[in-house]
Amino acid sequence: MRDDTPIRAAGQEFPHGLDLLRDPLLNKGTAFTERERDALGLRGLLPPHVLSQDEQAERVLSHLRRLPDDLEKYIALSALHDRNEALFFRIVCDNIDEMQPLIYTPTVGLACQQYGHILQRSRGLFIGANDRGLIAQVLRNWPHRAGIIVVSDGERILGLGDLGANGMGIPVGKLSLYTACAGVHPALCLPVMLDVGTNNTGLLSDPFYVGLRQRRLRGAGYDELVEEFITAAQEAFPGVLIQFEDFANQNAFRLLNKYRDRSCIFNDDIQGTAAVALAGILSALRITGGSLTDQKLLFLGAGEAAIGIANLVVSAMVAQGLSEPAARARCGMVDSRGLVVKSRADLSEEKRRYAQDHAPVGDFLEAVKTLRPTAIIGVAAVGGTFTEDVLREMALINQRPIVFSLSNPTSQSECTAEEAYRHTGGRALFACGSPFDPVTVNARTFVPRQGNNSYIFPGVGLGAIASRARRITDEMFMAAAHTLAHDVTESDLQPGSLYPALPRIREVSAHIGTAVARVAYRNGLAAEREPEDIPAHVTSQMYDPRYRSYV
């Protein structure tokens, strides 16, 4: 939405005085002009000197950069977010390389672990297992017309596991990236935590834990709560896009399959991760000159991320002429019990599709030696598992091995950028889930970039809002992946970067939003007529976090 998007409900009076200063969507703090101060009852409520937004940003950055650690910076940025959204997003947008690791991964993982200890002001809606039968009423307490909901039940937060209601930091962070990276108006963004309890005994005994003090709700009761939420959200906010986030494997696939054809819903851990990984592979192939259909992928992990990536890669291989069985055979997976093979009796339906017709293989290094993959993709959230031996073996098998260490936060990364480049003699084509600094090996400097879902989901959301899409489809994520790969320049590839520079993220998101909107219009999934100029229509929806005059 544009920066002049109405924030107040129809007929609602514009706030004055302290009410205006306490509204983060409208507050400008010391930037209110003399005329605004007189007209809006602010005279005397602010220091007399008027600062521009640029001056305010300089002051905030000066303070922020003096803070001792990233968690303190996260807390300070959260406080700014709570009192002045335009200034918060102006600072994030103008300093995205510095700010994204603070407001999202890796810092958000530590913030979620400490959530009850650092909470200053609640954001979003907490819907508890004790709210069954009342969810429609809870949603009516939200004061804005939500366009995008990011919802989690906190069971699988990043690679950190069950953090219960403390996982609210993830929906809040994801929605911050919708605004910062794709210009989705913050008034349209609603974070939701489905608090169904936690099995984390440390949290249950923590006096500052913010959630329900009970073990996780399972079975029919859980499904009924989710059903009530989905139904109530659609009624409260017609056409709302709902993003599932950080649900455990046992719920992620079945909830996506249950709701994707009846609502505007996607799961970022499955579909967003898939699109960003496929884009990285396509970028790597521009360096190697190989064909996608010739690649052999070996995943460390066989959960929602691995299966989501494999599904999209298979679709892309099929589009390039490979049969589906042949494409699936080119994707192997190693889980906690070894290589996923057909003889195993413990496989879920999703894993079984990727079971290799092979004798059992017990560990990842042996799987690399046996299957001889061109790419290894780490999504198991087990730190250090791309060992020196694994990386050297990949370099022995391949002239330019593709190494994607996608787990986050940093402590869960399968290997560091320095390890990937050093142990392959600088030949690895590397992407990471957590940020790493440039690395110099053999007198050449490599610039690793994150295969972060923030390259994908904000643009998908922007395109869905711009077209008023009724559904989110795999074709949209395929279009997003190809668009992202196309936006990687030769100057990006030269130092080994497989993704665009992060300061270009709003441009990239506008391109992805356009591609997603085109799919919606072409397939009859849009609730409005196709505009003559789709790119112009999409960019016209993007929020600019600069102050506007109120008088």
Image (tube, rainbow, N blue to C red):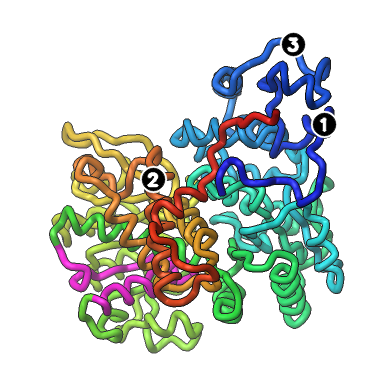
Q: Residues within 10 Å of mark 2 (few under 14, many from 20)?
A: some
Residue type, label 3: Pro
Residue on which the image places disc 1: 16
What residue is at 15 percent from the left and 56 percent from the top? 288
**Main structural element of the magenta stretch: helix, strand or loop?**
helix
Between 222 and 80, the one lying in front of the other is 80
Q: Determine contact: label 3, label 2, CB under 8 Å.
A: no
Between 248 and 396, the one lying in front of the other is 248
Q: Residues within 10 Å of mark 3 (few under 14, many from 20)?
A: few
Say which label, 3 or 2, has the lower sequence index: 3
Is residue 303 covered in magenta? yes
Residue on which the image places disc 2: 507
Give how far apart the Cα atoms at labels 2 and 1 are: 36 Å
Is residue 152 covered in magenta? no
**Of the numbered discs in the image, which one, if any, rests on residue 547?**
none
Residue on which the image places disc 3: 48
Between 58 and 276, the one lying in front of the other is 58
- Camera-near label (1 vs 3) is 1
Quarter of the image holding residue 218? bottom right
Magenta region, residue range = 290-319
What residue is at 63 percent from the left and 16 percent from the top? 51
